Image (tube, grey):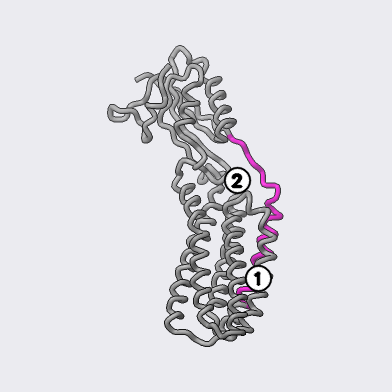
């Protein structure tokens, strides 16, 4: 096999988060606010004997924890790369989001179980206490959601915390309605129904975001990337003979990476650097792939007699 030449220039495009400090400040205020709400709902739930209020307190406590995780993950993700973490700490926010969502699913399942048990063992509830505390909770949720809304668009980590808060706001509205129905009609069953609905609502919201975080952690091909199109575009570059051993994955929400083997003729060795730059620019512009590692060869590498390629790209990458 011909001697291979490797091009390991990394196309880095650094994105600086100018709103980092303001986001961390907002997260801190939100954490304090949610701790106060959690304590109010916990006391209110115990005094009124309302399971939906206690479930809201538990949900709110998970909100507080999620905000704490988001804040810690955000601080960690800003650290510079080092010898141990050559890619840096960008995935810290994704791991934070994953922990948040898993705890949220566990909380939801617990609430559903408690609600079903209460259904078979109904108990009297103080609707007025339930009503007043739920209004305090809703107010706190509204302020927290307002603080996090603009930042939730740019970060899966902040978005997971924001969804926590939104879901909790919805459940507070439910508890307020439940409190009114209990005060006026003594419909204690409403408390049970609300508890189960809050749990199902949390599960529904968590599912899609959990899939996204798992995809990133599993280094799946990003949803917006058609790997065959990427290979086709690379193959059409002048003087490229073959493209194989292609991997595309997300480092975090904002950084897509690619590695690939590129076959060229020996006669084109002097064009290698220009080719490398051209391919990297094209990948960045057309597919938003900001970090690419290209290994150049004179013929496709073989692994036990077959191309060393986990994903078969031979049908797409045609030799010129």
Is residue 162 in the magenta section? no
Image quadrant assignment for residue 74: bottom right
The image position of residue 267, as x and y in percent, is 45, 12
Where does the N terminus fall, quadrant-wise? top left
Q: Is residue 43 above or below residue 276?
A: below
Find numbered disc 1 in the image and state the secondary structure of the residue it sits on.
Answer: helix
The image position of residue 147, as x and y in percent, is 69, 60
Residue furthest out toward the left: 304
Q: Distance between the residues labelled 1 and 2?
A: 39 Å
Where does the C terminus fall, quadrant-wise? top left
The image position of residue 288, as x and y in percent, is 57, 35
Question: Can see residue 47?
Answer: no
Mark number, residue 189: none
The magenta-colored residue range is 12-40
Is residue 18 in the magenta section? yes
Q: Is residue 155 above or below residue 290?
A: below
The image position of residue 315, as x and y in percent, is 38, 26
In the rendered view, does 227 fall on the left or right side of 181?
Answer: left
Q: What residue lies at 50% left-to-right and 26% top-to-bottom? A: 233
Q: Earlier in the sequence, mark 1 or mark 2?
A: 2
Residue furthest out toward the front: 185
| Nearer to the camera, 164 or 263 | 164
In the rendered view, does 42 fall on the left or right side of 29?
Answer: left
Q: Residues within 10 Å of mark 1 (few under 14, many from 20)?
A: many
| Nearer to the camera, 244 or 116 | 116
Find numbered disc 2 in the image and state the secondary structure of the residue it sits on.
Answer: loop
Predominant SS of the magenta segment: helix
Q: Which mark is nearer the camera, 1 or 2?
A: 1
Image quadrant assignment for residue 48: bottom right
Q: Which residue is disc 2 drawn over?
A: 80
Q: Which residue is disc 1 drawn over?
A: 138
Question: Can see residue 12?
Answer: yes
């Amino acid at each position: 096999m011909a001697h291979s030449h490797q091009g390991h220039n990394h196309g880095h495009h650094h994105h600086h988060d100018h709103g980092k400090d303001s986001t961390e400040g907002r997260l801190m205020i939100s954490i304090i606010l949610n701790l106060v709400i959690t304590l109010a709902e916990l006391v209110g739930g115990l005094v009124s004997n309302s399971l939906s209020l206690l479930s809201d307190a538990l949900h709110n406590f998970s909100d507080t924890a999620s905000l704490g995780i988001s804040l810690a993950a955000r601080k960690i993700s800003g650290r510079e790369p080092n010898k141990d973490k050559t890619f840096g700490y960008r995935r810290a926010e994704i791991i934070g989001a994953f922990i948040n969502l898993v705890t949220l699913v566990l909380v939801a399942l617990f609430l559903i179980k408690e609600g079903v048990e209460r259904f078979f063992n109904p108990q009297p509830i103080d609707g007025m206490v339930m009503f007043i505390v739920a209004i305090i909770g809703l107010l706190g949720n509204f302020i927290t959601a307002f603080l996090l809304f603009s930042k939730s668009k740019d970060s899966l980590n902040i978005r997971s915390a924001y969804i926590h808060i939104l879901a909790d706001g919805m459940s507070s509205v439910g508890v307020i309605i439940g409190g009114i129905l209990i005060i006026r009609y003594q419909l204690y069953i409403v408390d049970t129904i609300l508890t189960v609905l809050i749990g199902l609502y949390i599960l529904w919201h968590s599912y899609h975001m959990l899939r996204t975080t798992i995809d990133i952690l599993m280094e799946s091909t990003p949803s917006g990337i058609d790997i065959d199109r990427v290979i086709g575009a690379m193959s059409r570059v002048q003087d490229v003979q073959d493209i194989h051993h292609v991997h595309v994955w997300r480092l975090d929400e904002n950084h897509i990476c690619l590695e690939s083997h590129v076959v060229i003729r020996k006669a084109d060795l002097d064009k290698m650097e220009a080719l490398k730059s051209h391919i990297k620019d094209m990948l960045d512009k057309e597919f938003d792939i900001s970090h690419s590692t290209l290994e150049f060869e004179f013929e496709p590498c073989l692994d036990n007699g077959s191309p060393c390629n986990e994903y078969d790209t031979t049908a797409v990458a045609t030799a010129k």
